[in-house]
Image: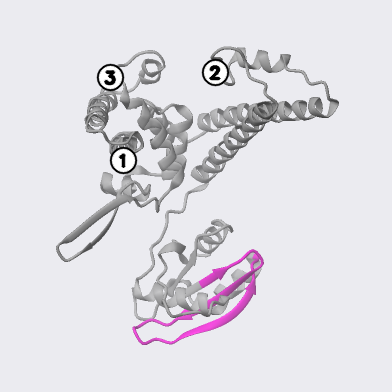
Amino acid sequence: MKKNTRYVGLDVHAQTIAIAVAEGGRDGEVRSLGTIPNTPEAVRKAVKKLGSVENLAVCYEAGPCGDVLYWQLTELGVRCEVVAPTLVPMRSGDRVKTDRRDAEKLARCYRSGDLTAVWVPDAEHEALRDLVRARESAKEDQRRARQHVRHFLLRHGRRPEGATRAWTAKYETWLGSVRFEQPALEATMLDYRMEVQHARDRIERLERAIDAAVEKAPAKMQAVIAALQALRGIAKVSAVTLVAELGEFSRFARPRQLMGYAGAVSGEHSSGESVRRGAITKTGNSHVRRIVGEAAWAYQHRPGVYGALRKRQAGLSEEVKAIAWKAQHRLCGRYRKLAGKGKPHQKVVTAVARELLGFIWAIGTHVERTAA
C-alpha cells in the first residue's frame, strides 16, 4: 500500500463503534479517534472526516453484527476487510481490554499485515446461508423435542413392544396409543408430542423455502448445487449448505486450502527433529465439517450408482460423474483400509471426510469454470 494510506481499526458493537487510526509507515502514529453511534449517518460522517476514501483501509472483526457495516463502507468507496477475531495477535502480558485499545490494536496489526481477512458473502449467498442455518437450528430443536418424549416415556416405564425403531410410522402409531391415568402426565405427554410436530412442520416449511430459493438462484449457483449431488452422501440440502457456506470454490487455490478452511486438517506441534501431529484442528467452518462428516459414512459401502443417486446424477456432465465415480472408489478403499487396520470408526470417517472435501473442490471448481 501507499505510504500515505491511513489504516483504520473499528471495534464494532450493537450500539457503538470505537475508531482508531494508524498513519502509514512503520513509525506512523497510532491514535484513538473516539466512539461514534453504530448508525449509517454516523459512519458516513466519520468516513468523511478521515479524508479521501482512496487513502483509507478499514478493518473490523467478524462478529454478531454481521456484514452490514462492510457493505455500507464499500458503498462509500472505502476499502474494507472483515478479519478473523481468533487470529488477531495477542500479547501474553496484556491484561487491560477496552474498546479504545482494541481499535488501536486492530489498526496497528492491520498496518503491519498481521490480520487474516475472512470471506464476506454476497447477497445471494448470505440469504441462502441464513436459510440453511435456520433449518439446521430446526433440526436441532427437533432432536431435543424427540429426546424429551423418549426420556419422559423411559422414566415411566413405557416402551414399544419388539424392536421398533424410534420415530418410524409404527413408533408414531404406538405413541398415539400411550395413555396415563394422571391428567398431569397426559398434559405433559401431549405438550411434548405437539413440540415434536411443531418441529417437523417447521423443517418441512424451511425445506420448501430452500427449494424455492434454489430455483431463483443465479444459474452458476444452481449448476454447482446440482453437480455436488453427484457425490454419494450429498443430497440437495447438503449441497445447498456447502455452496452457501463456501461461496465460490475457485477462491481456494488448492483442495488442501478448503480442508484447512473446514478445520479438517491435523494439528501439529513440532520442534527440531520432533514432529507430533494430533487431532484435527476444528478451527474452521463447523457447518461444512458437519456436512462432510455425515456424508463420509456413506463410503463404507461398495461403489455403486442406483436409486436416489442415479436420479441426482441424471442430466449431469460426464466429467462430473467421472469425478464422483472416482470418489466412490477412492474413499471406499480408504475407509476399508483404515477400518481393516483397527482404527476407530470416528477416526476413519474423519479421514474420509477430509479427502471428500478434495472431490467437492474438484467438482465445484470444474462447474464454475465451465459455467462461466
Which label's residue is closer to the chain start, 2 or 3?
A: 2
Percent from the top left, x then y, of residue 253? 27, 49
Q: Amino acid at mark 2?
A: Arg
Which label's residue is closer to the chain start, 2 or 1?
A: 2
The residue wearing badge 3 is 302
Q: Which residues are magenta?
A: 10-39
Q: Is residue 62 left or right of residue 201?
A: left
Q: Could you say whether the residue bearing mark 2 is in a helix, strand or loop? A: loop
Residue appearing at x 36%, y 16% in the figure: 310
Mark 2 vs 1: CB contact within 8 A: no
Q: Could you say whether the residue bearing mark 3 is in a helix, strand or loop? A: loop
Main secondary structure found in the magenta portion:
strand
Residue nearest the viewer, comparing 179 with 265: 179
Q: Amino acid at mark 3?
A: Arg
Asked whether 265 falls inside the magenta stretch, the response is no
Q: Amino acid at mark 1?
A: Arg
Which label's residue is closer to the chain start, 1 or 3?
A: 3
Q: Residue furthest left?
A: 273
Q: Residue furthest front?
A: 157
Q: Quick one: quadrant of the C terminus?
A: top left
For mark 2, does the 10 Å Cα neighbourhood hold few (<14), some (14 to 19), or many (20 or more) residues?
few
The residue wearing badge 2 is 165
Residue appearing at x 49%, y 79% in the figure: 104
Distance from label 1 to label 3 (Cα)? 19 Å
The residue wearing badge 1 is 354
Residue appearing at x 40%, y 16% in the figure: 311
Q: Is residue 257 above or below residue 155?
A: below
Mark 2 vs 3: CB contact within 8 A: no
Q: Which mark is residue 286?
A: none
Residue nearest the viewer, comparing 304 with 17: 304
